Amino acid sequence: MTMFVQPPIPRRAALSGILASALLPVAVRAAAPSYDAVVAPPERTALPAGRRFPDLDAALKAAPADARRPYRIWIARGDWTGQFVIDRPHVELVGEDRAATRLCFTAASGLIAPDGRPYGTFRTAVVKVTAPGFSARSLTIDNRFDGTAEMRKTGPRLLSDAPAGPQAIALALIEGSDGAQLDRVDIHSHQDSLFVDAGSSRFSDCLISGSYDFIFGAGSALFERCEIRSRLRPDPAQVTGYVVAPSTLAERAVGLLLHRCRLTRESGVADGSVFLGRPWRPSKRFDDGRYGDPMAVGMAACLDCWMDAHIAPAGWTEMWFTDRAGNNRHMLQPEEARFSEYRSSGPGAPQAGIKRRGALLTAADAQNLLRQIARTRQG
């Protein structure tokens, strides 16, 4: 069951809302949007029209398995704690307040789950989507595992490079997901914040924060006008951060595409300490063994993006994978992947006299990528 904590509503804001509602003509008040489900605590009374549910789990379970139109769920402000699975098509989540409607949970790969086993990376997601047509707007998805505190520990701790480490997914779009659209959604974690591994998706005017491979996966995703915020890594031995880690298959033309985004940083993130990305080549089982999938040739591009000075002058960097001989430190170079930029600006943009790894695109190249990802979403 979802655990709910409602934040206080400022008295002035509450009175203003009541007064504004009272002054609306009856016809305008009647035209307020209605929803298939309204998730709110019992004490809330002035709510949109729709069937009432005490928690988000119950509302999700009421969604039809064969929906052909959006099943719209309105969610009141407050902390809705749990792990939520979107396994019905065309579910739409609408928050009352972007910052105050929070879907949250605390899990990390190396922590022990209720079943007595470590979570493992792919069981940590706060929201997991396995159905097509998902959409969300005006809310926050937050994995509250404290990566900063973990890195500050002086004794045993979860290490970023370990399989059972601090990986903590906030949102996962996995097999079955396609056509997901998120608008004005905040997605927070530290490592592996956003797992975009299947289908196509679009993120508009979102905030995505993390410090280490925090946008990753094999799916096609367009990020438009988003803030991509790098978080502080206080451990001097693990100060380096990475924004994206695509594992795009060679057959897929477009992977992670950042368009007109702002790459920002928290206070304390050092100049030159964060790479735009590195190519992830996950292992899979083959007839002759288990090793990095040679068809995983990561693709990512930054088009018309502003970058603060935390972005490393080289831009992109290498990443290890397990080769067929069993060497788990075989390095995959960014030149072996598909990394590129077009018209980057700001202190972290390419600098004269310093080699930038990855391709620098022309205007025609950039337009072609945008057309390709548009076709991916349409088809």
Image (cartoon, helix red, strand yellow):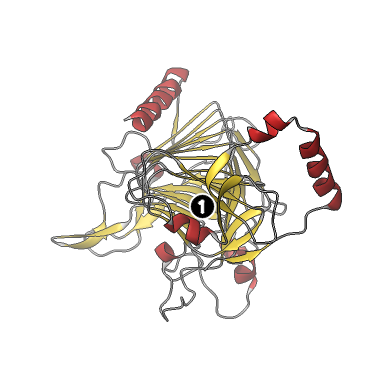
Nearest the eye: 175 or 37: 37
Name, please, the residue furthest toward the top.
Answer: 364
Image position of 378 (left or right of 46): left
Q: In this view of the protein, can residue 220 be seen by the observer? A: yes
Residue located at (41% from left, 69% from top): 120
Task: Name the residue beneath numbered marker 1.
Answer: 214
Q: How many labels does the image show?
A: 1
Q: In this view of the protein, can residue 207 be seen by the observer? A: no
Nearest the eye: 84 or 300: 84
On screen, 261 above or below 126?
A: above
| Residue 285 screen position, x and y as percent | 21, 61
| Residue 230 screen position, x and y as percent | 61, 50
Residue located at (48% from left, 69% from top): 165
- Tag 1, which secondary structure? strand
Nearest the eye: 91 or 229: 91
Image position of 286 (left or right of 52): left
Circle 1 crowding by C-alpha within 10 Å: few under 14, some 14–19, many from 20: many
- Which corner quadrant of the image does residue 16 belong to? top right
| Residue 273 screen position, x and y as percent | 60, 51
Identify the image quadrant of the C terminus: top left
Nearest the eye: 218 or 330: 218
| Residue 218 screen position, x and y as percent | 36, 46
Amino acid at the residue labelled 1 = Phe
Residue located at (25% from left, 46% from top): 295
